[in-house]
Amino acid sequence: GGNDSQNITINTISSNPSSLPIEESFESSQMLGANWSIKNPDNSFTWEQNSNAIDGSYSTYMNNYDYNSPGQEDDLISPFFDLSLFSWPRLTFKHAYSLYSNTYPDTLTVLITNDCGITNTIIYQKYGSALSTTQGFTQQAFVPNQSQWAGDTIMLNAFISFDKAQLIFRNTNKYGNNLYLDHIMIDGANNISYLNTTSPIEMLQTKEHLKFYFKNSGT
């Protein structure tokens, strides 16, 4: 809890597109993996590492509970990546949130850009009760248990022309309650059947814990 934004190291960003798949689970001692960044316009509360996680030991979260700055936006920005290599690219991530009250609905927006954020397209937006992963209201600082996380999947095949794409995970503060993200994955396939992950084979690639899921078709 608290404002730990001064402890976050902003990485030097490479403009060379990263190869897919990309995974970020916030396990690094600096929270962010290579070429991720944070935009914190007011130098106040922002995305920070938290030990409440659905996968591994850490997640990232926005302390909206203590952050009295309605309308303020904080961005978690992905590396550049090339979507043109897949017919069926997708984004998956997990989030946890509980509504303080209907008066204070924080918002999570995910945007995609191909020009460093000059123009953005909203691909996901939820706020208030639609964002909440709990029943009713939580009028203390929200700390999720393992059952209070939700999985989100967004197909990105409308953007396969993007060869220098980035994703922006934007928290819009309403002084409500804490919002957590974990296990962000950008992957894809050239046949949509390969994205069936009911019984996935998981391949671990490189020290940065990049993962790709293949359908186990038995062939």
Image (spheres, grey):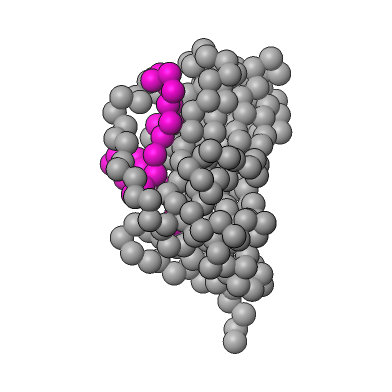
Q: What residue do we see at 54% from left, 30% from top?
A: 171
Main SS, magenta residues? loop
- Estimate the x, y position of residue 71 in percent, counting from the top left: 58, 18
Q: What residue do we see at 36% from left, 43% from top?
A: 32
- Estimate the x, y position of residue 13 in percent, counting from the top left: 34, 45
Image quadrant of residue 138? Answer: top right
**Horizontally, is 173 left or right of 23 in the view?**
right
Image quadrant of residue 200? Answer: bottom right
Q: Which residues are magenta?
A: 22-48
**Horizontally, is 59 left or right of 119 in the view?**
left
The residue lying furthest to the bottom in this view is 219
The answer to whether 96 is drawn above or below residue 201 in the figure is above
- Estimate the x, y position of residue 78 in percent, counting from the top left: 45, 46
Along the line of sight, the residue nearer the viewer: 27 or 68: 68
> Is residue 54 magenta-colored?
no
The C terminus, quarter of image: bottom right
Q: What residue do we see at 55% from left, 45% from top?
A: 113
